[in-house]
Amino acid sequence: MIDTHAHIYASEFDQDREEVVKRALSQGIDRILLPNIDLESIEPMLATEKQFPEVCRSMMGLHPCYVDANVEQTLATIKSWFDKHNFIAVGEIGIDLYWDKTFRAEQEKAFVTQLNWAKEMNLPVVIHTRDSIEETLTLLRQEQDGSLRGVFHCFGGSLEEAQAINKLGFHLGLGGVSTFKNGGMDKVIPHLDMDYVILETDCPYLAPVPHRGKRNEPSYTELVAQRIADLRGLALEEVDAITTNNAEKLFSL
Ligand SMILES: [Zn+2]
């Protein structure tokens, strides 16, 4: 199994990072993909990748919540990292209209700029949206030239939104939200095209049931897989095989 979205480089894991990775391995989660968020996260992310080279792979990008008036400068620094290191994806990038709309125009510009890097470098993109699926889809439709691929991470939307995302060639990252009783995903997951589903935790955030509200970690990827298996009438092994294959292809692992 692959946790395709885990911030295990965050300070929440400073006390027990090695145990967290061991626990993941013992649950059959043998690869953990690390999305970048801003300039400060680069160093701990690369250190974590170096500590667990068989398990962890890094991405590079600027998260929409960290876009501010300095966006041009920040993007130039982020871009320069692609010349210094091998990254598996451009991410995480996107639009977030939940927390703060002050830099909405800058967010959109940063998103489009990074989509174009992905095209140039032939890399997948890892997309964060919050209250912004429609806005994000509009920009993606403008930029999709047939070469863009990626994932809407932490997907918790409707079946119609899922289908619109798939139609553009994009995957859905299912995580803890899929296990929430009031999340509505029990109505959506049975009808999803499994060719576009990958697993994630987004740890340390959004822990799945029965750990909801506590620190999340990669070993809980299995709880998400089990939830999908239950809702689809599949064996856990089948969900593992399908989603692992999807993630391997998407990220060229
Ligand atoms: Zn994230």
Image: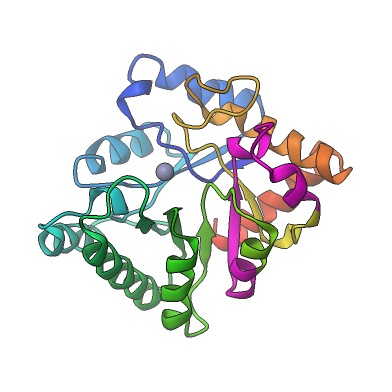
Q: In this view, does 11 lie to the left or right of 171?
A: left
Relative image position of residue 220 (x, y in whole percent) = 61, 28
For the record, the magenta segment spans 164-190
Quadrant showing the N terminus: top right
245 relative to 39, above or below: below
- Quadrant location of the C terminus in the rendered image: bottom right
Give the vertical position of 208 relative to 154 (above or below): above
Residue at (69%, 31%) from the top-left corner? 181
Q: Is residue 163 left or right of residue 251?
A: right
Residue drawn at the location 10% of the way across and 61% of the way down: 73
Residue lying at the far bottom of the rendered structure:
145
**Residue situated in front as seen by the camera: 215 or 82:** 215
Ligand 1 - quadrant of the structure image: top left
Is residue 25 depicted above or below 63 in this figure? above
Question: Which of 68/51 is in front?
Answer: 68
For the point 64% across and 25% down, which residue is it? 209
Q: Where is residue 229 in the image (x, y as percent from the top left)?
A: 80, 40
Residue occupying the far right of the picture: 233
Q: In this view, does 138 lie to the left or right of 249?
A: left
How many numbered dots are placed on residues in this image?
0
Res 72 quadrant in image: bottom left
Q: Residue at the spot x=67%, y=64% of the render?
A: 160
Q: How is the image coloured?
A: rainbow
144 left or right, relative to 11: right
Q: Within the magenta stretch, is there residue 171?
A: yes
Direction top: furthest residue: 15
Where residue 219 appears, as percent x and y from the top left, is 59, 27
Q: Does the magenta stretch include residue 211?
A: no
Q: Image height check: is 60 above or below 43?
A: below
Residue 174 at what x, y percent from top left? 61, 46
